[in-house]
Amino acid sequence: MPVRLFHLRVAVASTGGVFADGFGLGIIGISLSFAAPRLGLDVVWVGLLGAASLAGLFAGSLLTGPLADGIGRRPIYASNMAIAALLSLLQFWATSGAQLLFLRLAIGFLLGTDYVVCKALLTEFLPRRLRGRVLGQLSIAWAGGYACAYATGFALSGMGPGAWRWMLLVSAVPCLLFAPLRITIPESPVWLVARGRSERATRIIRARLGIDIQTPVAAPGIAGHKGRWRLLCSPRWRVRTLVGCIFFTCQVIPYFAVGTFVTQVMLALHLNGAYYGGLLYNLALVGGAVAGVIAVDFISRRSFLIGSFGITAVMALLLSVGHHLAATELVIAFAIFAGVLSAASNLCYVYLPELFPTDLRASGIGLSVAASRIGSAIGTFLLPVVVAAYGIETALGACVVVLFTGALVSYIWAPETRYLSLAALDRPVADGGSR
C-alpha cells in the first residue's frame, strides 16, 4: 500500500492520544507531593493514589479487548479522549483523597481503553514497511507526555497551596486537543473483513486510501466460535499470550514504580537537587524513546527485548548497591536506566500487536496490558512503603529481580515478528487455532 495523507491523520490522532495518556499518568507523581499535606494523605494514601490510574488501566484494558474485537475499534477510539478530558477537569474540585481516588480510577479506565484500541487500529491501517517506525513513535509520544507532565508540574509548583489542582487540571488539555480529530477516523478495514463486512471495508479503502487499493482478503473470523480469552490460552496462542503478559509486566513495574516517585527515590539516595534530577530522568525517557524508534528497524524484536532487559537490570543493580558512588555517577546510571527502559517500551506498541491475529488482537493486547497493570499498580503502591520500611536499596533490588525475570522469559519463549505479515498471522485462526 502506498503512503497516503490519511495515514498521517491516523498517526497524529493516535499519537496525540498516547501523549495524553502519558501526561495523565505522569502528572500524578509530582502533584501528589504537593497534594499530600493539603489533603492530609499518609504514605498509604499516597501509594493508593499513585497506583489508582494503573488499577483503572487494568480494568479498562481487560474489558475493552473483547469489546473492541466484537463491536470494532472505532466506537471506543472516537469517544474515550473526550470522556477522559471531562474526568481530568473534575480533579480540580476534589476535596478529599477518596474523591481523587475515584477520579484517578476512572481516568485510568479510560486510558486503558485507549491502550487497546489505539495499538490495534493503527497497526491495522499501516503499511507493513512503516509499522515499526510509526508504532514506535507512540512510545516517543507517551514518554514525551510523561516528561511534559513532570516539567509542567515543576513549572506550576510556585502557584501556592492549590498548585496541585492546576497540575491535575491541565491534564485535560491534550485530551481536548486530539478528541475532535479522532471522530473523523473510520473503522479498521482489516477488522471489517475479518467480520465478513467486505463491502463496507471496500468503501472505506476507496474513500480514504484510493480506488486502486484492493480490499484485503482475510480468513474468516472466530467470533462466536469460542471465548476469546479461552482462545488466547489455547495451544496455538498461549505461548504468545504468556510472552505478551510477562514482558509487558516486567517492563512497566520498574517504569512506573521508579518514574512515579523518581523525586522521592533520588532524595532517598541522598541526591541534592532531586527535582532537577527527576527532570533529567524524564528527559532520558524521551531520548530513549527516540533512540528506540531508530533501533526498532535495525534490531530484531527478540534481541531488542532480551538486551534491554539485561541492560536495565544491570543499571538497577548498580543503583541498589551504589551508595558509595558519587552523585553524578548515580544520575548517569539513572539516565541509562530510564533511556534503555524507554527505548524498549517501543516494543509495547510494535511487538505486542504483532503477537496476535486480527480477531484476537484487541483481546490479546487488553489481556497483556491488564496483566502489566496488576504488577505496576502493586509495584507503585508498594515502592514508597518499602522505601520507608526497608530502604531504597531493597526497593531497587526488587526491580532487578523483575527485570531479570523478563529477560529470562523472553530468551526462552519470545518469537521473532519483525517481518510478520498480519494476513499470514490470521490464517491459523480459521482452523480453530489448532496450528
Image (cartoon, rainbow, N blue to C red):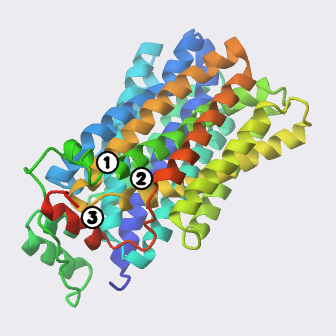
- Can the viewer see residue 107? no
* Residue shown at 60% from the left, 16% from the top: 36
Q: Position of residue 387 (x, y in %)?
A: 68, 19
Label 3 crowd bin: few (<14), some (14–19), many (20+), radius 10 Å: some
- The type of residue carrying mark 2 is Gly
Q: Which residue is mark 2?
A: 17
Q: Earlier in the sequence, mark 2 or mark 1?
A: 2
- Looking at the image, residue 252 lies above or below residue 7: above
Q: Earlier in the sequence, mark 1 or mark 3?
A: 3
Q: Are marks 2 and 1 in contact (CB under 8 Å)?
A: no
In front: 100, or 374? Answer: 374
Label for residue 185? 3
* Residue shown at 43% from the left, 31% from the top: 374
* Residue shown at 26% from the left, 64% from the top: 184
- Measure the C-alpha gap from mark 1 to mark 3: 32 Å
What is the quadrant of residue 219 in the picture? Answer: bottom left
Q: Position of residue 146 (x, y in %)?
A: 57, 45
- Measure the C-alpha gap from mark 3 to mark 2: 13 Å
Label 1 crowd bin: few (<14), some (14–19), many (20+), radius 10 Å: some
Q: Which residue is mark 1?
A: 238
Secondary structure found at label 1: helix
